Image (cartoon, rainbow, N blue to C red):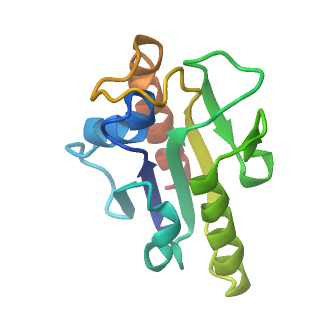
């Protein structure tokens, strides 16, 4: 069986930036195959090298800025499609994660990686609740993740 790591990113008290955290909360009580590991990592995905290294597949759940998609749009990217700079602003946590993936690839043990999430509406307001546009997409993303996990089995 392929080992699958799902990394849930974001800050639980920053409105839409909490998206990954809320998806994690929706999935943590689910019964998943033994080869699936769920890790809620906050902003620390780039510090999870010891968890990433050697996995067959990794799915990163987060919010993804876009210059041409509406807030609440569900997105799915491969690493080479990931937009790290939007409107002149660099997504530093994802930039560092991509650096880590490049370093892990040198060892030949880098997982096949996929990014799934939503385009945020609000990232700066402090709140435990995402905006309605983003909150409504949590069940859809959970279903996407379950399909991805099943497809890897």
Would you say 59 lies left or right of 132 here? right
Residue at screen point 25% across, 46% down: 28
Looking at this view, name the residue that lies furthest to the bottom: 107
Residue 21 appears in the picture as rendered? yes
Residue at screen point 55% across, 18% down: 72
Where is residue 56? Give x, y as percent. Answer: 56, 69
140 vs 59: above or below: above
150 vs 37: above or below: above
Where is residue 22? Give x, y as percent. Answer: 32, 35
Looking at this view, name the residue that lies furthest to the top: 132
Would you say 78 lies left or right of 52 here? right
Count of marks placed on residues:
0
126 vs 92: above or below: above
**Looking at the image, which is closer to me, 102 or 152?**
102
Residue at screen point 56% across, 62% down: 57
Residue at screen point 64% across, 47% down: 91
Residue 83 appears in the picture as rendered? no
Would you say 83 lies left or right of 146 here? right
**Looking at the image, which is closer to me, 66 or 55?**
66
Q: Quadrant of residue 64?
A: top right
Would you say 104 lies left or right of 30 here? right
Q: Quadrant of residue 13?
A: top left
53 vs 130: above or below: below
Looking at this view, name the residue that lies furthest to the left: 29
Where is residue 14? Give x, y as percent. Answer: 38, 34
**Looking at the image, which is closer to me, 129 or 104?**
129
Where is residue 100? Give x, y as percent. Answer: 62, 72
């Amino acid at each position: 069986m392929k080992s699958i790591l799902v990394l849930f990113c974001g800050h639980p008290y920053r409105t839409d930036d909490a998206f990954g955290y809320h998806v994690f909360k929706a999935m943590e009580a689910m019964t998943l195959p033994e080869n699936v590991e769920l890790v809620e990592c906050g902003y620390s995905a780039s510090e999870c090298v010891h968890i990433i290294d050697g996995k067959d597949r990794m799915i990163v759940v987060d919010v993804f800025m876009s210059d041409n998609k509406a807030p609440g749009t569900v997105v799915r990217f491969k690493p080479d499609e990931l937009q790290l700079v939007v409107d002149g602003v660099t997504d530093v946590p994802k930039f560092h994660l991509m650096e880590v993936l490049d370093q892990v690839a040198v060892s030949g043990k880098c997982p096949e990686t996929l990014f799934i999430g939503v385009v945020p509406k609000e990232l700066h307001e402090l709140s435990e609740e995402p905006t309605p546009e983003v909150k409504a997409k949590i069940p859809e993303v959970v279903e996407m993740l379950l399909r991805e996990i099943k497809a890897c089995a």
